């Protein structure tokens, strides 16, 4: 049977989303602004640590205006456990200030508006759009980038190109489910240092795991 990239992609999406039926982000939040802040803090930090940090942060600064006009040193101390706290504190304070002053503290469900905020790139914006507003987006974090390349969904390792390649290859209705599954798979089975190929639900589809050269996606 002739192998095609389209069939390969369809099989990957089907098998991964069945293997990881849980949907959503592990970050804990009560509104879009809290998710925005939590996502900025999650850069190079575990969701577990972010979830331990944000309750005290949001207790001290319960809305964008409060955080946007906070003392930066005090914010740094609160977010220190997430790492890179100087830059993260600067970003969350600046983004909150812009939200307070330009939109009355309301997070607009728009990629254009979100990426205008300090410290907010496409990945962070897509997380907010997907999990706070229910939009179908392609969140390219380190797991999605690495696994998409490994299993043949893209030939690029540039995050924006990976995003475009997945959007072109996968029906929009499956974007969130696929990205959530890739993230879960990258954290549990296909880890960067020691992938557990024997336990992988899509090992038979992986070009890096013994799939014949003639079956590789073109």
Image (cartoon, grey):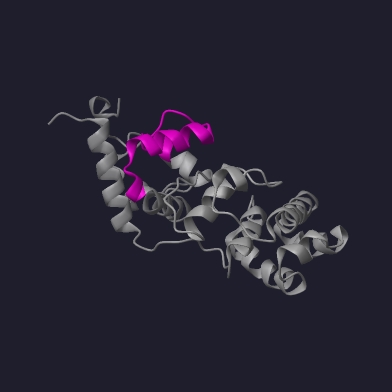
What residue is shown at x 41% (from left), y 50% (from top)? 136
Asked if residue 81 lies left or right of residue 115, the reply is: right
Majority secondary structure of the magenta segment?
helix
Quadrant assignment, res 122 = top right
Instruction: Work out which quarter of the rendered image holds the C terminus and state it.
Output: top left
Region of the chain picked out in magenta, as a range: 148-174
32 or 37, which lies in front?
Answer: 32
What residue is shown at x 26% (from left), y 37% (from top)? 8
What residue is shown at x 68% (from left), y 67% (from top)? 54
Of all residues shown, which one is farthest toward the bottom? Answer: 59
Q: Is residue 192 visible?
A: no
Q: Is residue 152 above or below residue 187?
A: above
Residue 184: percent from the left, percent from the top? 44, 55
Residue 190: percent from the left, percent from the top? 42, 48
Could you tell me how many numbered marks the image carries?
A: 0
Residue 130: percent from the left, percent from the top? 47, 55
What residue is shown at x 73% (from left), y 72% (from top)? 56
185 or 132, which lies in front?
Answer: 132
Residue 101: in magenta span: no
Q: Is residue 156 above or below residue 122?
A: above
């Amino acid at each position: 049977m002739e192998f095609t990239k389209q069939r390969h992609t369809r099989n990957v999406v089907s098998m991964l989303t069945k293997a990881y039926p849980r949907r959503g982000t592990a970050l804990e939040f009560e509104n879009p602004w809290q998710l925005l802040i939590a996502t900025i803090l999650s850069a190079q930090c575990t969701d577990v640590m972010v979830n331990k940090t944000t309750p005290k942060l949001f207790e001290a600064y319960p809305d964008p205006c409060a955080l946007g006009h906070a003392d930066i040193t005090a914010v740094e101390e609160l977010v220190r456990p997430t790492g890179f706290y100087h830059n993260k504190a600067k970003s969350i304070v600046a983004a909150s200030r812009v939200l307070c002053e330009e939109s009355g503290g309301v997070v607009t469900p728009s990629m254009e508006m979100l990426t205008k905020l300090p410290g907010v790139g496409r990945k962070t914006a897509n997380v907010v759009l997907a999990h706070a507003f229910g939009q179908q987006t392609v969140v390219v974090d380190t797991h999605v980038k690495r696994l998409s390349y490994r299993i043949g969904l893209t030939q690029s390792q540039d995050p924006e190109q990976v995003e475009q390649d997945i959007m072109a290859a996968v029906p929009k209705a499956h974007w969130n489910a696929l990205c959530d599954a890739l993230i879960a798979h990258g954290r549990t089975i296909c880890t960067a240092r020691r992938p557990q190929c024997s336990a992988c639900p899509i090992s038979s589809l992986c070009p890096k795991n013994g799939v014949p050269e003639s079956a590789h996606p073109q």
